[in-house]
Amino acid sequence: MTASFEVNENSDVYYTGTYWNDFEVVRERINGRISGNPTRKWHEHLALETGRTFKRALILNCGNGWVERELVESGLIAEGVGIDYSQSLLDEAGAAARENGLPLTYHQANINTGSFPEAEFDLVVNHAAAHHIAAIDRVFRQVCRILPEDGWFVSFDYVGPHRNQYRLDAWEEVWQLNEQIPESFRQDLEYPPVPVMLVVDPTEAVHSELILETFRRYFTEDQVTALGGAIAYPLLTHNARIFTTEDEVGRSEAIERILQVDDAFLSEHPESTLFAYFAGQPKKDVLTQVDLLARWETEEAEREQRAQDNGGEYYERGPLATALVALEEQRALNAGMQAQREHLEAELQAMQSSFLYSRARRLVDSDWARTVRGNRMVAGLERRVRS
């Protein structure tokens, strides 16, 4: 069964805004953590580590196709197949592939319920895709099935708290650091409200906390590298001030300060990482453990059912999220009370105006008024009453 929160009907939310890894210095930090070389990208690192190129890659939730285009152009893969739910993004990806003469094909599918294209793959790529997948066990199990024993599953993804419900100590660090950097570079911080996220993108970070756990079920851990972001990501992503400033020196200093704090926080709290790079090969023997597979399948079905019964929310809200929702509800209540007050005041004013008009009208129409109608004061009163 497909629920509204399993897929995002609106692809306009993707490829909009600016993210922390739009900064070259952040990309170099990420490259350095993955490969030890700030200028070596993850796919170049994969080629060196595996000592091979790949015949055909499957790219999960490929979006507009920029990832597989880069993989073909770099020589890592000979050809690629992308799948995505959004037909508009697939059309964009296909057009770009044809324009550049690249051996890439595309298939529209709901990854939670559909099947992978019929083809042989020796590489499957998850580039920021799995944190949008509801049926995470089902999908990773499929990947394990279709890959040969020497195939590879490589991922670069958000693995932090679901629905971006950041941990309290990290959010406190973010808030304090934001107050310390120059005001011209500060972020407009707002803790992500779950109800709003369900409307904007019901798939965002739907099971991000389960990604690494599920990966370990079906694949070897040839590399799992934490990339941080608990501090830097909320402060740099969608930060209009720091992106648009003309103060290049100030911006560089602010970003470096943020990254230093991010590094220190990750070192002290390794489990706090929001992003990770991980790669491994399929554990084919797991697919023979019928009872274990059945248990994981049941757990996933029950989890999805709970979400359907709860409007798309899988987990209990944390203290910050709970407080935020309570605050918004109070604001709405106050706004409603204010609107009701204004309405009552308007009605009272109308009643008073009507009462005063009636009295004035009776005065104008009285015998006394008619006898002195030529008096300017009474005439003026009549004009005001009639107007």
Image (cartoon, helix red, strand yellow):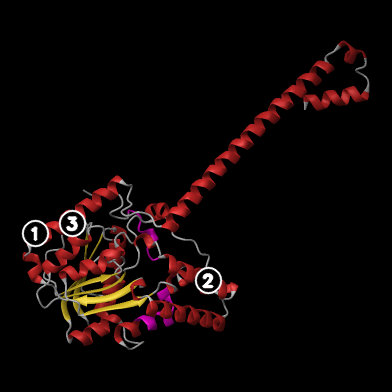
Q: Where is residue 112 in the image (x, y as percent from the top left)?
A: 22, 57
Outermost residue, top side = 367
**Cα–Cα gap, marks 2 and 1:** 49 Å
**Cα–Cα gap, marks 3 and 2:** 45 Å
Callout 1 secondary element: helix
In front of the other: 150 or 261: 261
Query: In the shown orientation, is residue 253 left or right of residue 307?
Result: right
Question: Within 10 angstroms of label 2, few (less than 14), some, or many (20 or more) residues?
Answer: few
Q: Do the residues labelled 3 and 2 touch (CB within 8 Å)?
A: no
Q: What stretch is highlighted in magenta?
A: 9-30
Q: In this view, does 116 lie above or below 327?
A: below
Q: What residue sits right under mark 3 in the picture?
A: 114
Q: Quadrant of residue 300?
A: bottom left
The kind of residue tagged 3 is Gly
Q: Residue 291 carries which label?
A: 1
Callout 2 secondary element: helix
**Cα–Cα gap, marks 1 and 3:** 23 Å
Count how many numbered circles sit on residues in the image: 3
Q: Residue 332: tell me if it is visible.
A: yes
Q: Residue at horizontal 70%, vertical 30%?
A: 349
Q: Where is residue 186 in the image (x, y as percent from the top left)?
A: 55, 71
Give the quadrant of the C terminus.
top right
Q: Where is residue 147 in the image (x, y as percent from the top left)?
A: 12, 71
Q: Where is residue 179 in the image (x, y as percent from the top left)?
A: 56, 71
Q: What residue sits right under mark 2 in the picture?
A: 176
The kind of residue tagged 2 is Gln
